[in-house]
Image (cartoon, rainbow, N blue to C red):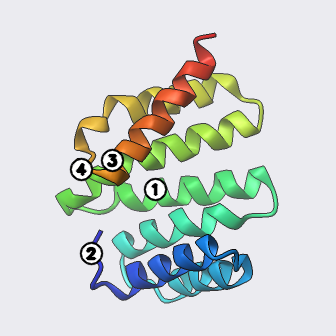
Amino acid sequence: MDNDNPIVKLCTDGMQAEAGGDVDRARALFAQAWDTRTDEYEACVAAHYVARHQPTPEDTLAWNQTALDCAGRVTDEQIRQFYPSLYHNLGKSYEDLGNRDDAKRYYRLASDCTGALPEGPYGDMVRTAIEAALARFDR
């Protein structure tokens, strides 16, 4: 992610607030990121984080779908590294709603594009989450 981007900075600050237990501040920062986005890349990033604090699984699904839809309108190649996480989150949304078929489909899409993930802690975290999700369906 582009850490010089103001939307990315808001979301990073929101993640730090989450880690510190200040969920209300995190939610406000993510909403501010959404409200001040200027392009589809920023919309994708903001929606991805807004999805984290929704009151219902249906709302979470809607925001995760918004993030994916926005990503689809970004032409920058950098967006490719987001797809595994975006697909994983959609899979999780469908799983939470009891829709196993769509959940598994999105988890497989996430797995199919893990080659785009960067090496390091972020990539490892996403790969591990995808593997764990698929393992739940292979039991």
Distance of mark 2 from mark 1, alpha carbons?
20 Å
Tell which circle, 4 or 3, labels the residue nearer the N-terminal end: 4
- Relative depth, front residue between 34 and 6: 6
| Residue 9 image-quadrant placement | bottom left
Q: Which label was assigned to residue 123?
A: 3
What is the x, y in percent for residue 83?
A: 37, 47
Q: Amino acid at mark 3?
A: Gly
Looking at this rendering, what residue extends furthest in the left direction? Answer: 77
- 99 left or right, relative to 103: right
Circle 2 SS class: loop
Q: Nearer the viewer, mark 4 or mark 1?
A: 4
Q: Amino acid at mark 4?
A: Pro
> Can residue 84 be seen?
no
Q: Amino acid at mark 1?
A: Asp
Q: Quadrant of the N terminus?
A: bottom left
Q: Which label was assigned to residue 69?
A: 1
**Mark 3 crowdedness (10 Å alpha carbons): few <14, some 14-19, many ≥20:** some
Circle 3 SS class: helix
Q: What residue does disc 2 label? A: 2
